[in-house]
Image: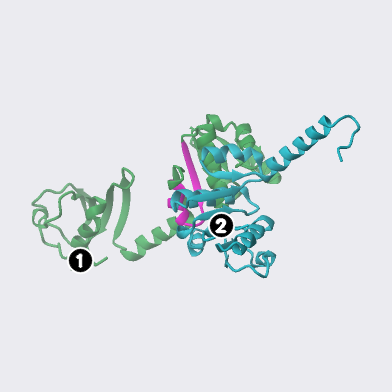
Chain colours: A cyan, B green
Amino acid sequence: MNTGKGLFIIVVGCGRLGSYLADKFSGAGAGVVVVDREERAFESLSTEFGGFKVEGDATEFAVLKQARIAKADVVIGATHDDNVNMMIAQIARKVFLVPTVIARVQEPRRINLCQALAIDSICPTAIAGDLVLKTLEQASEKGQDGGHR
Amino acid sequence: MNTLIVGGGKLVYFLCRTFLSKGYRVTIVNRNRGECVWLARRLKATVVYGEGSDPHVLEEAQADGVDAVLAVTPNDEDNLMVCQLASLQFGVPHTLALVNDPDNEEVFRKLGVTAAFSTTGLLSSLIEQKAAFEDITSLISVAGGKVNVTEIVLREGAPVIGLALADLGLPPDSLIASILRDERPIIPRGVTTLRAQDRLIVVTLPENHGRVLKMLTGDVT
């Protein structure tokens, strides 16, 4: 996979999703900056990670500038806090005019607000929930013997 | 006036008390159950327990009927979301947010919050005003900062002492509206002569504000 090759990508939040994406982008040849307010979070990155790490709270404007947000092609909000992700996504999109911005939002009730604010969001809860429903639906279609495997 | 305050602590308690004394209706949203009980016992306000950036909680707090929302939690991101949710999904006309990072004042306004203010910004501008020129007090700024009204004390040695107003050569769009001399107000005319210890009430525009102050006090700012 070479998603992100040649792009400058900022990943905010170095948890499971953030570190996963940062490693993938870095491996694909993107310029990557990861931001997290806990230095320990960077331990989740692989040893091959070749990007930059910025330790700081991304709701602080100066920290986003330090991550060189004005030059970013892509900004991804992947902290554990929906509101932080949505705030950063908006700052990236509306203040710094970053072309591609995605906020991870855990709470499905916030999807409407993301749409109203014109920010792209991904809701893992809704995705997983829909998958479960779809799987159950397929299982029940397969017959009445109970198992589908 | 019907207001909704999201946040906690002494700030919310006193804010709410002030609003109630002005006859406003107040609803408080707070995410700490114990604090909700404490607030509800002491204030004649509706207290709703929950996360203010959750649409269901704002609905329960009847945000669709309020005139203004104040978001004063300690977290900038929560305050932003409360304000945006209130204005976009509940049609609240005025939203005010407290921000920690003074840089976020401008950012929040760009993102549609009616007014964002930081304690840091307020305090530091107060201190700057006092420290930079003790003799100059910014009284009010009218029309969203388009007109400034400033009070200036003329010290001995100020370059304009002894001159008549007509001879000052003040730039257009500026005015010495009043002079307080020995505690007595004077509405000056072109022939009025300035004296040391006069307190001038000066009306300026932001474009000529600095120049006018410098002409009157002689200070370089």
Tell me, yes or no, whether the highlighted magenta stretch contains residue B97.
yes
Asked if A130 appears above or below B99 in the picture, the reply is above
Rate crowding at label 1 as few (under 14), some (14 to 19) or many (20 or more) other CA atoms within 10 Å: some
The type of residue carrying mark 2 is Gly
Q: Which residue is mark 2?
A: A4
- Residue sitting nearer the eye, B196 or A113: A113
Q: Position of residue A128 (x, y in %)?
A: 72, 42
Does the magenta segment cover residue B67?
no
On the image, the x and y values in percent for residue A86 come to 56, 48
Position in image of residue B98 (x %, y %): 51, 49
Between B185 and B136, the one lying in front of the other is B136
The kind of residue on which mark 1 rests is: Gly
At label 2, counting other C-alpha atoms closer than 10 Å, the crowd grade (few under 14, some 14-19, many 20 or more) is: some
Point out the residue furthest to the right here.
Answer: A145
Quarter occupied by residue A36? bottom right
Provide the secondary structure element on which disc 2 rests.
loop
In front: mark 2 or mark 1?
2
Instruction: Give the numbered dot on residue A62.
Output: none
Q: According to the image, label 1 marks what residue? A: B218
- Gap in angstroms between the C-alphas marked 2 and 1: 59 Å
What is the tally of numbered marks visible in this picture?
Answer: 2
The residues colored magenta run B94-109
Q: Chain of mark 1?
A: B
Answer with the quarter of the image where residue B63 lies.
top right
Residue at the limit of the structure toward the front, as seen here: A1
- For image coordinates 89% across by 29% down, the residue present is A144
Residue in the foreground of this view, choosing between B201 and B218: B218
The chain under label 2 reads A
